[in-house]
Image: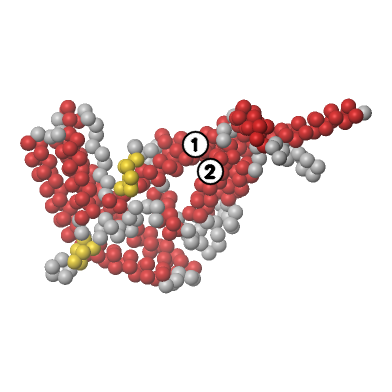
Amino acid sequence: MDRSRTSDTARVVAHERRFPLNGNKFQIGVAAVVMLVLLRVAIGWHFLYEGVWKISHADKFSAEPFLSQAKGPAAPLFYAMLPDMDGRQRLALGVNEAGEKTVKPDVYLAAWKNLKQEVVGRYKPGPEQTKTIETIYERYEDSLLDYLAANREDIVAYHESLDRFEADRAAGNDGAPFQRKRSWDRRMELRGEVNGWFAELDGMGEEYRLALWDVLDKDQKARGMLPKLVTSPESLPVPVPFVQTRSDALDMSVTYGLTAIGLCLVLGLCTRLAAIGGGVFLIFVLLTQPPWPAIYPPAPEVVGHALIVDKNFVEMVAIFALVALPVGRWGGLDYFLYHWIGRPLEDRYGNKS
């Protein structure tokens, strides 16, 4: 009898060590284990494919459109992640000798000069090439000044409208539904306006970069393509390999973060850490587009209707549930990590009183 009880006790202890939820009040069966592992793999596949798609479409993916459309109380946090979104630096205003407001070209000219110096320092052009490079710079400098002068009145009016918009927001003049709609529409209108100038100026800068590239001979071009133009608002505080701008750093963080989270969840490797990362990412997604009442604009009807709880919220709850469960050990590489590393450490240090 004693032998039987000892055997039963040993089996219960062994079972509880394998399935931590087992006990006097809670039990979990094999079917539940299988479904939880499938849930982990399904969520992991979702993250993994999102990351892989962004890697394969790197020329099309940018986090900027998503962040610039953020709404709700946390929206300013995401706007701050985008470099000079409203053009306060790149299209800064100055005053000329006649007392008229003008648009300063300093940010763009500084970037263009830096690129010219990069060409001279990296490719070591000859005297004739150097003269041609200087001529190209002067030509594009004149084009930039002409462009800013031609659009001066519109850019000045834009800044004045932006000032009024921000003053109204600070005064809290967007409490009523029609005011929230008007405020959002006005924000999008102003952003579309400044993005049009950015696109034309960036296009001019790209033409300038390619014009400098065409000056180089075959041997010089073999040293590698010119880096892209980076204005001071977009530059990184410290150099990072393979990353040139703040936007690049943000895009790479999202792309490879999603890929790593998804791969770890699919394989069951470092599952809890990956699930925490995925949950935090989904929190940020929810904060950019919260499905809360009185938040304008509402989600398009084609994606369904939600009140506080939407698909992102459900996935967030599910992934945090995985954090509380050893699903990586139940069907993943964490089984080997635990038995080869975790269990020996636990037996050696965990049982000391």
Disc 1 marks which amino acid? Ala
Secondary structure found at label 2: helix
Disc 2 marks which amino acid? Gly
* Count of numbered circles in the view: 2
> 187 or 83, which lies in front?
83
Identify the disc placed on residue 277: 2
Query: Please, is residue 136 above or below residue 193 in the view?
Result: above
Identify the disc placed on residue 260: 1
Query: Please, is residue 262 above or below residue 336 in the view?
Result: below
Labels 2 & 1 near each other (Cβ < 8 A): yes
Residue projecting furthest to the right: 1
Task: Say which residue appears at 42% left-offset and 66% top-offset.
Answer: 182
Task: Say which residue appears at 52% left-offset and 56% top-offset.
Answer: 290
> 39 or 245, which lies in front?
245
Task: Say which residue appears at 64% left-offset and 29% top-offset.
Answer: 344
Question: Which percent across, then down, holds residue 139?
Answer: 12, 48
Name which quarter of the figure residue 115 lies in: top left
Identify the disc placed on residue 57: none
